[in-house]
Amino acid sequence: MVFWILLPISLSLVSLIGTWVTAPGSPCGNNTSTACCNVPTISSSGTNSPESSLFTATINAGSFLFLVFCIFHHAHILDRNRVQSMLSRIALVFGGVAAVGAFVAGNCNPTALTIGHYLGAAVSFLCICFYSLLLTVLTGKCVLTHMEWVLYPARIVSTGIQIVVTVCYTILFVQEDYMYKHIAALFEWIMSVNLELFELSFAVEFWFFSSSTLSTLMRKKEEEKPILLS
């Protein structure tokens, strides 16, 4: 049903529009000297009001939609290719942890609860890399749309970018040099946009999704059902 493609589209748009709309307009404030400008990271949006409230709302909505997306995608794999159920469950765990990490980061003000914010962000970024990798592997192993010949190579490129950019961001972010931190902020924005495009590509799979697919989450395999003795 066409209705189900709204999930990955909504997930992508909420994250993309939300983070860019709430981004601070001037990282330098009233002072235009280069040395005192704040590093324009995504987290900067969650520091001061009113952007911080919008930032938290965006992250909360995105985290919830991402968790729903993970569960629904797992149901789709169970319905169409149960032999890959174990790999899909592992992906679901990484996706769920990533959603929780993002939720923690979004609800911890970077200045007031710095450790909580950056710990949640670090967990989310790391798990997103593993989740993207596993979903790409599943794309190559499962036929859900018959468009895998296009989706698989595209997701390989997207996942490669996500992992490389995440590693570069992590290395540069911990540096003391001011310029390195600005480059790290650039990598963070690239990482965010790349993930949102990756999520948007799953609108193709959700075109073939149906309400009955969700029932697979509660359905037991025949060999797992108890044998009734007469």
Image (cartoon, rainbow, N blue to C red):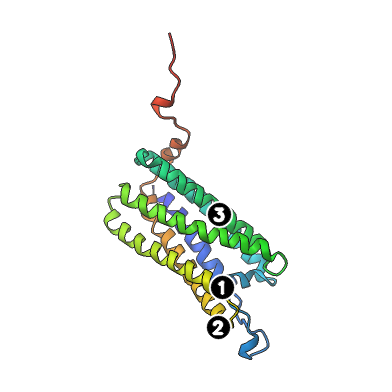
The image quarter containing residue 113 is: bottom right
Q: Which residue was labeled with disc 2?
A: 179
Picture disc at residue 99:
3
Which x, y percent locates residue 223? Answer: 39, 25
Q: Which residue was labeled with disc 1?
A: 173
Q: 10 Å neighbourhood of mark 3: few (<14), some, or many (≥20)?
A: many
Q: Residue at x 41, y 56 (%)?
A: 133
Question: Which one is earlier in the sequence, the residue at label 1 or at label 3?
Answer: 3
Q: In the current view of this chain or complex, which residue is farthest to the right? A: 112
Question: Which one is earlier in the sequence, the residue at label 2 or at label 3?
Answer: 3
Q: Tell me the amino acid under the disc marked 1.
A: Phe
* Quadrant in which the C terminus is drawn: top left
Which x, y percent locates residue 75? Answer: 43, 42
Question: What's the CA distance linking mark 2 and mark 3?
Answer: 30 Å
Closer mark to the observer between disc 2 and disc 3: 2
Picture disc at residue 159:
none
For the residues labelled 1 and 2, say whether their Cβ atoms are less than 8 Å apart.
no
Tell me if I can see residue 210 in this picture.
no
Question: What's the CA distance linking mark 1 and mark 3?
Answer: 22 Å
Is residue 189 placed above or below 132 in the rendered structure? below
For the residues labelled 2 and 3, say whether their Cβ atoms are less than 8 Å apart.
no
Q: Residue at x 46, y 63 (%)?
A: 195
Left or right relative to 80: residue 23: right
Question: What's the CA distance linking mark 1 and mark 2?
Answer: 10 Å
How many numbered marks have been drawn onto this rendered protein structure?
3
Q: Tell me the amino acid under the disc marked 2.
A: Met
Q: Tell me the amino acid under the disc marked 3.
A: Ala
Mark 1 secondary-structure assignment? helix
